[in-house]
Amino acid sequence: MKSRYNHILIAIILLSLVCGLWLVYNRYKVEARNDTVEMVMDYQILKRIADWEGLSERSVLNQFKDAGITTLAVYDTTLERLDKDGSIVAIPGKDLLRNSKDSTSGGVFKQLAQRGELKYDAVYIAEGDSKTVFSELLTDLRLRYGFNRVSIVGNNPVILEVKGDPRELTLVDYEHKTPLMQAPLGLSSKEMRNVRNAGFNVVVRPQNYLPVSRQAIDNIFARIAASGAKVTAYLPSGMDVVGYPDNEYYMSRLLHDYDIRVGLIEHVTQLQFAKFNGLSDLLEESNYDAVRVYTIDQMENGKITMPEGMRRWSVSDEERNIRMNYIRPFLKPQGAQDILQLNLDYVRGITASVQKAGFKIGTATVLQQTGPTTSTNSFAGPYFPPKLAVGILAFGIFAALAVYLSLLVKISLRQQLWLTAIGGLAALVTIYMSRGLLTRQALAFIAAVVFPALSMSVILDVGDRFREKTGSLAALAFNTTWQLALAVLISLAGATFIASVLGDNRFFLEADIYRGVKLTFILPPLLAALLFIRRYDMFGTADGQPLGLAAQLKRLCQIKLSVAHLLILAVLGIVAIIFVGRSGHSAGVPVPALEIKMRVLLEHLMYARPREKEFLVGHPAFYLAALALYQKWPRIWQLLLVMAATIGQGSLVQTFCHMRTPVLMSYVRALDGYVLGAVIGIIVLVVVALLLPYVRKWQRSLVADE
């Protein structure tokens, strides 16, 4: 029998697939080397816990270090904080004028008060027990506020007057400029030195200077150098990255010189990362030397229990290439445990689960080239696939598109080859001439929607050949199981194209993401439906041969709808809304509690939890579609079941559009989905096949009664 497929195009697809598998292997090596997770908590919060428990700072820090914490985050200091720990004396002028706090100042401001030189809208600062702290403070105040607002108004001790808002906020206010007492004043070398002496690394979280200058940025790194601390990462704080709007390049050079990574805090929707002005530019200027960071949002952290929080960390590390766990402690007792013991158990549990998942605990590794580094720091450079290899993939993807179109409409062999050649060459040229981001996105989109539809076309071919040989329910189940495996393999070919064409540091870090997630769910069933309508007679023509595609679509549009039809369409519409609404990360369709419990169970039982659209919808529908075709159900039911079966294939391919997920896990997820879906599908097939005779008997009785 003459094949319906162009053998030249099939050969092009297979050759391109070999190239894609090679790129996937390279990507796997990049991801496999990224195997160390860094455990981070805030230094100031641990100090606060020590105060609450009446323990020394060092003893509490040692306990958290033993529990698994490797790194402490240090924020900018403030006048309020420095005053509380005795490093300086800082009092708003309004309080001094009211004599409400002068007694606590040791009388250092009395002379100013006697001379009548105190101002209401100012803060007064006296040197405390550390000349280094005071020197850093003076430098930072002048960088942030200028010499006109910062004046030396007293000696022995030195007293500063800083003009500005003297309020002390009790609640965080992100809508207005922060008052002087709580405004950021740069990293404290003393705090970083304390962290270093306690045996931890440091993550720095300084806020941007307004206005920013290279001198201000130099000041940050001068304090890092003075502290002697090992700083592993910079995580933005506030609204901007340090250096925004026009000094991101300078900031990136200093980060490189100090071998400090950029930390990308995953957004609460788990899509891309928390937005800070200038972060994308800083990431690009840093050559994608960055680490993905997971933290539980502060508001959510206050609502969940410790066991709920604990299960999230290792899953995030495994499934989303998170390599820095930024742990927020619980600040209220739970389960009859005090705060210290509760959080120590929490950290120990997270550490154990991360290690059980196969990760090492230490300084976070990053996604980078697998070759040896030649730079002055430990970053070997970002991983990007060779442009020629991506061009080869383009020819394979356009060949698949040509194959699909040839099944739908009459296209000559020459036209198919021209489409493949022109599409592949155009993609290759744009990739070489520029970054080629839009081209690569388009290639991934074509692969994501075409290959699931092609998988169903091949299965229909196979099914037509084997249908006459299927004489029993067991034989039907066996044939359908290996046919589903074949469909999965074809869809995995498309997934391999996606995993390789988008496989680079930008997509790993989600600086760029795959576009068209919703369409990737919607189009494959529609494309498969067009092939089905083109292939089979939907309206029972006299000769049994299907009308042309256009004629059948026209007939479908002319069908008169009854109330029953409208009810069925309404149900299908609701299903579609849920189906599309559950895709991506911005959906408003909630996840039922029962489903969450099922997900947790599957996470424990399987290496990679399969997707519900595969093992609960698509793969069982595949078995029912085979039964419908074998038993010659009405064409409309066959069509709907084929479309439902394509949902599983589309979901499988769409899994690979999440570049943050290690590619090996995506392949295993597809295999797990196939196995679980096959088991459920066989059960559904048997149940439906056994019930059908009774349903038909009941239908006949209704007709007889009429």
Image: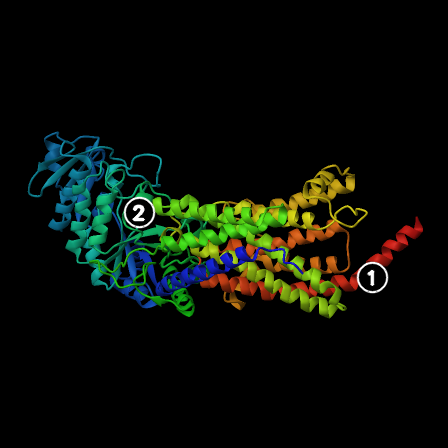
* In-image side of 438 versus 450 (left or right): left
Q: Callout 2: helix, strand or loop?
A: helix
The answer to whether residue 657 of the structure is visible from this angle is: no
Looking at the rendered structure, the kind of residue marked 2 is Glu
Nearer the observer, 150 or 279: 279
Residue positioned 69% across, 53% down in the render: 641
Tell me where residue 464 appears, x and y as whole percent. Answer: 70, 60
Q: Can you name the residue that lies furthest to the front here?
A: 414
* In-image side of 36 versus 183 (left or right): right
Tell me where residue 591 appears, x and y as whole percent. Answer: 57, 51
Q: Which mark is residue 693?
A: 1
Residue positioned 47% across, 48% down in the render: 421
User: Image quarter for residue 26?
Assistant: bottom left
The answer to whether residue 131 of the structure is visible from this angle is: yes
Q: Can you name the residue that lies furthest to the right here?
A: 705
* In-image side of 458 versus 301 (left or right): right
Looking at the rendered structure, the kind of residue marked 1 is Pro
Mark toward the start of the polypeptide (1 vs 2): 2
Label 2 crowd (10 A; few <14 / some 14-19 / many >=20): some
Q: Callout 1: helix, strand or loop?
A: helix
Nearer the observer, 422 or 317: 422
User: Image quarter for residue 23?
Assistant: bottom left
Residue positioned 40% across, 45% down in the render: 437
Q: Quadrant of the N terminus?
A: bottom right
C-alpha separation, residue under disc 1 versus residue under disc 2: 64 Å
Tell me where residue 368 appears, x and y as whole percent. Answer: 32, 58
**564 in relation to 334, above or below:** above
Nearer the observer, 615 or 542: 542
Tell me where residue 538 appears, x and y as whole percent. Answer: 74, 47
Count of marks placed on residues: 2
* In-image side of 628 versus 482 (left or right): right
Mark 2 lies on residue: 284
